[in-house]
Structure formats: structure tokens, C-alpha cells
Image (cartoon, rainbow, N blue to C red):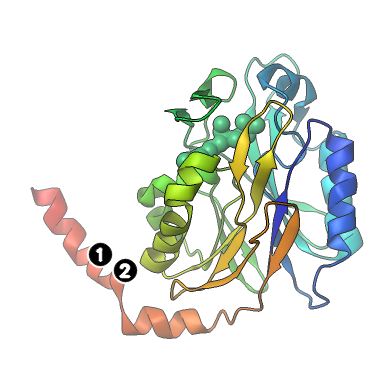
Amino acid sequence: MTAVQLTSSPDPQENLATLRQLFADLPDARPQLVVLPEACLCFGAGDKRQRELAEVAGEGPMQDGLAALARDFGVWLVAGTIPLIEQPDSDKFSAACLVFNPAGERVARYNKVSMFDVDVADNTRSYRESAATSPGSQVVTVETEFGTLGLAVCYDVRFPELFRALRLQGADILVLPSAFTQVTGKAHWQVLTRARAIEQQCILVAGTQVGEHANGRQTYGHGLIIDGWGEVKACVETASPGLATAAIDISALQQIRRDIPVLTHFSSSKKVFHEQ
Ligand SMILES: O=C(O)CNC(=O)[C@H](CS)NC(=O)CCC(=O)C(=O)O
């Protein structure tokens, strides 16, 4: 498994070229899961630019470029997020996380649910994601030959309810394309990602944005892979593009889930909460 860290620019073709260079260092093992960051092909250009670049599902140079990467390198690609529109004249776009199989076929789409309408004490100060993005409302899992993926994006990590829904829907590996702010990341990133892995007894793989972007935004990085026991198995420690890779034994999840049967206990405790 591989988490990819980027300092994405506003130019999709430039970012695709960077990805192609980084992928030369992917581990040889196949199947291989590769998770890109949020806004992987266009970051820091503003909402208007993102809307201009936005593609209708199934066609366009960003989707073609991502499909080609999956196919050329023979990997399962969780393609961070890109802006997708429902119709050519739509006002708002979805922050869509697409999953491509090693043949380059698109097998799933998750639209980011949790909108980052948040004030942060950094140089941006006020993030209003919902101004240009329409939120999704579906819980999306994807079956692969190495386990079931559960899809979530960045700010979603603060909502454990979504992750419980993913686990109940069969997730083994939580994938989390992200672009955490430097300020909130420093304080919360590792605790939140480890907590989601521990409480859902799933592996978690998070691709990340890092460094300073075209609009001066600063992202936290620390792309990482966490096992189902909550241990960080790999993390990009540098504030530059790179890969975090780890070979993780999925079968270890079964033992953890048998030993600490939180889902079984959840079904009985849930009844109590509802009666209150
Ligand atoms: O805007 C773009 O181009 C790409 N999208 C993002 O960067 C998103 C929405 S602004 N960022 C987050 O969700 C940060 C969450 C976060 O930092 C936290 O929960 O603390």
C-alpha cells in the first residue's frame, strides 16, 4: 500500500507529470493500492478555476490522465479528489474521489460529504468549501482482491459516524485523500487518523497535500498508513512530495475483530442510546 504526498499546483497536466515521476518509485508488489491527496490535480487556484476545470463524469483530460496512471503502473488508484459536475452548466462541483482498477477502469465515485466551512487561525483564516462545492450524501465502499475499501475525504475524518457506516458496509481499508491545514494538522491529524483506524478496526491509508501552495495556503502533509491496531506503519516525514509505503497483512484484522468485538457490542449498546 502506498500513500502519496504532493504539493499540487493549479495545473492538472503538471501534477500528472509529477505523479508519473513519483510512481517510478512504487514498490514492485501487485496488487498495489495507491492513495492520492485531496485536490490532487489542482490546488490553490481558487474556486473559479476549479469550476472551469471541472469535468462531467466519464470524460475529460483529468480523468483520462488518472486512468492512464492506474493502467500504466498496474495499480488500484484512489484518485484523491477532482472537481466533477453533473451537467456542463452546473454552478457547483462535487469534490469527487474516483477509484480506478489496474486496467484503468473507473470502479467507484465518492463525493466528499463533510464541507470544510471552518475558521482557522492561519493566513487563510476562513475556509468556506460549500460556497463552490456541493456535498455528497452516499456511503461508498469498493471491493478489491485485497479487501473492501471505505472512501472518505479530509474533513470527513472528524465525523466518526461516517466511518462506522463504512465499517458496517464492510470496509477493511479506509482511504482518506486529504489536504489538512498546517495549523489543524499539527494539533489533530495523527490522533484523528489513528482513532478512526482503532475504533473501526480497519487499516487507514491517507494521501496528503504538503507545503505552501499557489495561493499561500499551507498544508500539513504527513501522508501515512496505519494498521488495524492503530500503529503508524509508514509516514512521509519530510515537507515535500514523496511516498509512504508499507506491506500490511489484512488477515490480522480478523484476529483484532474477534478479540475486541466492538461491532457486536455496538449493536446492543445502540439500542440503549436510542431508548434515551
Ligand atoms: O480547497 C481545495 O482546493 C481542496 N480542498 C481542501 O483543501 C479541503 C476543503 S477547503 N480541506 C479540508 O477539508 C481541510 C480539513 C482540515 O484541515 C481539518 O479538518 O482540520
Q: Nearer the viewer, residue 148 or 79?
A: 79
- Which residue does the numbered mark 2 point to in the structure image? 263
Q: Which residue is at a point 84% across and 61% down the rendered structure image?
A: 23
Q: In the picture, residue 180 is in which quadrant?
A: top right
Answer above or below: position of 31 versus 34. below
- As drawn, the label of residue 150 is none
Indicate left or right for 104 with 173 as reference.
right
Viewer-side residue, 244 vs 130: 244
Which residue type carries mark 1? Answer: Phe
Is 73 drawn above or below residue 51 in the view shown?
Answer: below
Q: Secondary structure at mark 1?
A: helix
Q: Which residue is mark 1?
A: 266
Q: Are marks 2 and 1 in contact (CB under 8 Å)?
A: yes
Q: Establish whether ligand 1 lies closer than 8 Å to the Cβ of label 1.
A: no
Q: Amino acid at mark 2?
A: Leu
Residue located 68% across and 25% down the image:
86
Q: Quadrant of ligand 1?
A: top right
Query: Vertically, is 39 above or below 225?
Result: above
Query: Which sits in the foreground, 248 or 235?
Result: 235
Using the rendered view, name the quadrant where residue 78 is placed: bottom right
Q: Position of residue 148 (x, y in %)?
A: 57, 66
